[in-house]
């Protein structure tokens, strides 16, 4: 064909059908395989389970633990943190100067009032005493002679053999010598006192601390450091603070008598096993600390076993009142909601009623309910999170109680093993 001319191509319908037919077969095969896969997936997909557990849970009793509201006299305590202080603390210092010739106590020894602790060399003070005694004897002899002369002058004056002036002078000499004898007696007593200071004794019963001065050292009355410190441990004091809001309660308790105070280790829950000692409130400070808004108090404890030690921290419970015939429930039974405190009370048909309560006092020992729960009613102490008003419950045995051997009813999903764990 010449250049610039169009070439005619013969049209063959069979050829077109052949070219279009090949792709159509592949597409059909692909569709068949896809449909087969979808069908298999639908057939093999696990059937969904009906969502009935919630309905079953709603009708299944909730296992709970219960306690019975009781009536008893409940002591009302105020809690604080206290610092143990020695009832008396004495620093033993020398009263005179001299060599410390011996120390008669051991560090940490319990001493009684009057026990000898140390000795200072007494020779100089003994010599001063002897000198004062001799001086008094000398002056007493002169006084006796002056009195004899005065008596002679008085006779002579009566016989007008001497002047009245000479007799008056002799009387003045007698008075002067008598005063001198009195001064000598005072010097003797001073010397005796200084001599007694060379024997250092305990001014009170207590326990000695670390020895500050060893034997052989020269001690002085002006020394700032003493020989030893004695602390009185029986009885012993505990100083603690309470918020100023408690002032009226404390003052009322002191007006009614001597409030009891308990001491227990810091950070532990107070009970009969942890109580260190029982004492009484001795002092309520005469002012409120304006910087902290607290009041300071001091309690006294007998401390027979020396379990309270000066400088230690202890928990303190001050009894300010006693609630008589109070209705008490465990602290775990009291729940808190947006409208205040409430408890779940178990009815006769093992259903629960949510009941709002007023708590007049609460501590680790229990909560006092004011007229909202009657003595003998059962309250839920564990399992309240799954309860609602009117819910049916299954009361589980408390720890230590025998578990029933009767066949158990089916429990709600997720509650399997709850009975065995609580009853174990």
Image (cartoon, rainbow, N blue to C red):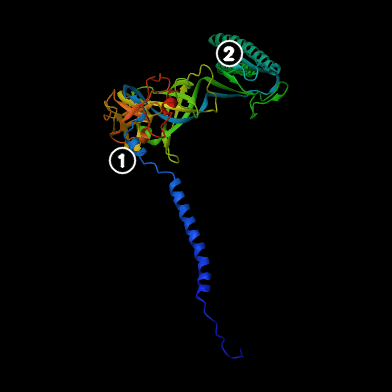
Element on which disc 2 rests: loop
Q: Residue at x 48, y 18 (%)?
A: 302
Relative vertical location of residue 235 with respect to residue 362 in this rendering, above or below:
above
Res. 386 image quadrant: top left
Q: Which residue is drawn at 36% across and 33% down?
A: 384
Report the residue marked by disc 2. 162
At label 1, counting other C-alpha atoms closer than 10 Å, the crowd grade (few under 14, some 14-19, many 20 or more) is few
Report the residue marked by disc 1. 339
Res. 385 image quadrant: top left
Q: Which residue is drawn at 43% across and 20% down?
A: 400
Number of callouts in the render?
2
Can I make out residue 282 in this image? no
User: As rendered, which of 112 and 173 lies closer to the eye?
Assistant: 112
Whole-Å distance between the Cαs marked 1 and 2?
115 Å
- Left or right of residue 132, residue 292 in this image: left
State which quarter of the image contains the N terminus: bottom right
């Amino acid at each position: 064909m010449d250049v610039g001319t169009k070439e005619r191509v013969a049209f063959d319908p069979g050829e077109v059908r052949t070219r279009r037919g090949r792709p159509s077969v592949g597409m059909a095969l692909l569709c068949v395989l896809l449909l087969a896969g979808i069908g298999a997936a639908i057939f093999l997909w696990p059937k969904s389970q009906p969502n009935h557990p919630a309905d079953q849970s709603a009708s299944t009793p909730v296992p709970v633990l219960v306690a019975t509201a009781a009536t008893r006299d409940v002591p009302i305590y105020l809690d604080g943190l206290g610092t143990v202080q020695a009832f008396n603390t004495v620093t033993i210092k020398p009263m005179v100067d001299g060599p410390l010739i011996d120390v008669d106590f051991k560090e940490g020894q319990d001493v009684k009032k009057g026990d000898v602790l140390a000795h200072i060399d007494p020779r100089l003070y003994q010599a001063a005493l002897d000198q004062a005694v001799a001086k008094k004897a000398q002056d007493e002899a002169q006084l006796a002679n002056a009195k004899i002369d005065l008596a002679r002058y008085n006779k002579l004056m009566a016989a007008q053999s001497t002047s009245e002036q000479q007799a008056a002078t002799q009387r003045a000499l007698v008075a002067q010598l008598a005063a001198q004898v009195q001064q000598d007696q005072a010097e003797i007593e001073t010397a005796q006192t200084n001599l007694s200071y060379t024997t250092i004794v305990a001014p009170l019963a207590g326990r000695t601390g670390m020895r500050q001065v060893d034997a052989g050292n020269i001690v002085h009355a002006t020394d700032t450091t003493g020989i030893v410190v004695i602390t009185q441990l029986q009885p012993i004091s505990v100083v603690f603070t309470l918020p100023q809001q408690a002032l009226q309660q404390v003052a009322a308790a002191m007006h009614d008598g001597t409030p009891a105070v308990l001491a227990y280790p810091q950070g532990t829950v107070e009970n009969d096993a942890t109580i260190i000692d029982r004492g009484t409130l001795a002092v309520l400070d005469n002012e409120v600390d304006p910087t902290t808004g607290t009041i300071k108090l001091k309690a006294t404890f007998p401390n027979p076993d020396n379990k309270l030690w000066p400088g230690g921290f202890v928990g303190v419970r001050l009894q300010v009142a006693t609630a008589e015939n109070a209705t008490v429930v465990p602290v775990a039974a009291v729940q808190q909601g947006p409208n205040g405190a409430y408890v779940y009370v178990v009815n006769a048909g093992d259903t629960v009623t949510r009941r709002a309560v007023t708590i007049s006092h609460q501590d680790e020992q229990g909560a006092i309910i004011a007229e909202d729960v009657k003595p003998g009613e059962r309250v839920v102490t564990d399992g309240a999170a799954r309860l609602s008003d009117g819910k049916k419950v299954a009361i589980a045995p408390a720890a230590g109680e025998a578990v029933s051997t009767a066949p158990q009813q089916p429990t709600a999903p997720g509650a399997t093993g709850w009975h065995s764990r609580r009853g174990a």
